[in-house]
Amino acid sequence: EAGVAQSPRYKIIEKRQSVAFWCNPISGHATLYWYQQILGQGPKLLIQFQNNGVVDDSQLPKDRFSAERLKGVDSTLKIQPAKLEDSAVYLCASSSRPQNYGYTFGSGTRLTVV
Amino acid sequence: AQKITQTQPGMFVQEKEAVTLDCTYDTSDQSYGLFWYKQPSSGEMIFLIYQGSYDEQNATEGRYSLNFQKARKSANLVISASQLGDSAMYFCAMSSYGQNFVFGPGTRLSVLP
């Protein structure tokens, strides 16, 4: 089966600019996650979708970050405006059920804010 | 709150030798799962092995085994017969039912030829 697709692979922007990342999960996976991984740290959950509804966005900085999953398939994560501390790898993952195992991660988008 | 601790920022191992990567966790839940992921320089998180809190036997997947000591709240990953391709970051993670993954800070493993 095809894996989790993410684009772009890399992005460099200036602070205060906007940026968007795209994720297409594995076909049939109802649960989709966005993680932020700052260099030298483990991934941190930003938001979890179950189909097209948000299950958990408690760690999403909502003043600048937004995410949507229209039609319960692919998803977009946006940052507006970006700050230097947003430099990180943004990982998308999907699973076939909203529980523990079966996460499949994409290759991530490496964002550099200068 | 759940927490994962990985005390080894970096590890070196000679090719073909075994290596143990440490992981301790903290949770008040009775039912939970423990996971290990590998992250090569390409950035993708690759699932390696899973251990359920009620599993009586240690999990094994090929060259990977999980040394699960529930009373000590540890879930160490053992890689046997290390290969150069094993050089990567390794993350321990846990999740309880209905909750999302919590990842540790990771251990960078370098396999020496």
Image: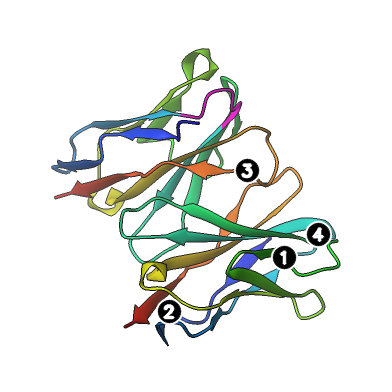
Residue in the image at 47% along x and 61% along y: B38
Task: Look at mark 2 in the image and give the residue it sits on.
Answer: B9
Distance in Å between CA atoms under marks 2 and 3: 27 Å
- Which tag is nearer the camera, tag 2 or tag 4? 2
Residue in the image at 82% along x and 56% along y: B31
Percent across and percent down for residue A40 are 36, 67
Label 3 Cα crowd, 10 Å radius (few <14 / some 14-19 / many 20+): some
Q: Nearer the viewer, residue B96 or A60?
A: B96
Q: Secondary structure at mark 1?
A: loop
Amino acid type, callout 4: Asp
Distance in Å between CA atoms under marks 3 and 4: 20 Å
Amino acid type, callout 1: Ala
- The chain containing the residue under callout 4 comes to B
Percent across and percent down for residue B19 are 52, 82
Distance in Å between CA atoms under marks 2 and 4: 27 Å
- Which tag is nearer the camera, tag 2 or tag 3? 3
Distance in Å between CA atoms under marks 4 and 1: 20 Å
Amino acid type, callout 2: Pro
Amino acid type, callout 3: Gly
- Which tag is nearer the camera, tag 1 or tag 2? 1
Who comes first in sequence, dot 2 or dot 4? 2
- Which tag is nearer the camera, tag 4 or tag 1? 1
- The chain containing the residue under callout 2 comes to B
Task: Look at mark 3 in the image and give the residue it sits on.
Answer: A102
